[in-house]
Amino acid sequence: MRIILSKSAAEAVDAVTTIVLDKLASHPSLVIGLATGRTMEPVYAEWVQKAVKLGLNMDKAFFFMLDEYLGIAENHPSSFKSYIKERLMIPLKLHESQFAFPPIHQSGEHYETLIQEAGGIDLQLLGIGVNGHIGFNEPGSTPGSRTRVVELTEETKLSNQSHFGIGQMPSKALSMGIGSIMDGKELLMLATGKSKADAIKYLMNHHNDEKCPASFLKSHAHFTLVLDPEAASKISLNI
Ligand code: GLP
């Protein structure tokens, strides 16, 4: 595992964005797995801003979304499809045909096949839940899990309720599994803010622990964890 400890949240966001854009510049047909959540919002904002400035052509790139809620319309303002359309697809004038979304009307196997047919995911972006979840792989998820329907924990529902206002928060989602994520050639996780400090501490101190799905990633040969000082506030790093 490679850790990048940034001096601020803005620097952490910049580190992630730079890695993504450098790869896209050198490999235009990169296949990228995209994560959602508040953590990733500034990454997409900076990605758009820099890509426009650099005149980066992304027409050959392909994107797989990591997860999606079940039980809401795909054009619901809080769906992850709407999230990425608003933050990446529309601002960068990318074509919808460059994106694959977890198949809410088809089996998870279909999504796994699509990923394989695309040659696998070159770079998988990830956030982390306060309980150590990745995508929507909640504690208890197994390392061999693949794209499937998952039940959200109360903790996750509470964290994400604000996206739904007074509306009903979905209790189920479709998520790439831990096995699907581990198949990615390179994994890049961003954690910022105090609310992630406990999850990061647990992640640092545990390996292959189902209580913290993110801990499985430490076995990956190319896993980079980017932290801001608040997310790193409960760990000690000798650097
Ligand atoms: C969300 C997503 C994850 C995300 C995590 C953290 O619900 N399913 O992909 O990494 O939970 O979200 P946030 O960045 O808002 O804390």
Image (cartoon, rainbow, N blue to C red):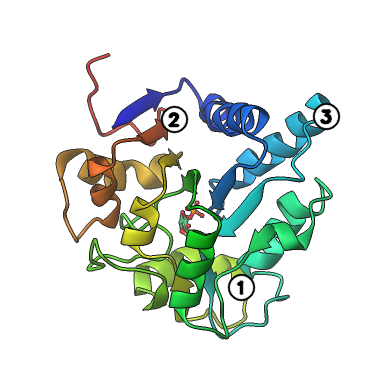
Quadrant the N terminus occupies: top left
Task: Tell me the CA gap for discs 3 and 2.
Answer: 29 Å
Residue at (71, 65) in percent of width and height:
82
Q: Mark 1 vs mark 2: which is more N-terminal?
A: 1
Residue type indicated by callout 1: Phe
Q: Residues within 10 Å of mark 1 (few under 14, many from 20)?
A: some
Would residue 129 be seen by someone viewing this image from the given angle?
no
Horizontal relation, residue 124 to residue 105: left or right: left
Task: Tell me the CA gap for discs 3 and 1.
Answer: 35 Å
Q: Is residue 181 above or below residue 60?
A: below
Q: Name the residue under label 3.
A: 55
- Residue 141: quarter of image: bottom left
Residue at (22, 25) in percent of width and height:
236
Outermost residue on the top side: it is 239
Q: Mark 2 points at which residue?
A: 228
Horizontal relation, residue 200 to residue 165: left or right: left
Q: In this view, does 124 lie above or below 97?
A: above
Horizontal relation, residue 30 to residue 203: left or right: right
Residue 107: mark: none
Of helix, strand and loop, which one carries label 3? loop
Of helix, strand and loop, which one carries label 2? loop
Q: Which of marks 3 and 1 is in front?
A: 3
Of helix, strand and loop, which one carries label 1? helix
Q: Name the residue under label 1.
A: 164
Residue type indicated by callout 3: Gly
Q: Residue 39 versus residue 115: which sits nearer the camera?
A: 115
Q: Residues within 10 Å of mark 2 (few under 14, many from 20)?
A: many
Q: Mark 3 vs mark 1: which is more N-terminal?
A: 3
Q: State how many labels appear.
A: 3
Residue type indicated by callout 2: Asp
Horizontal relation, residue 15 to residue 144: left or right: right
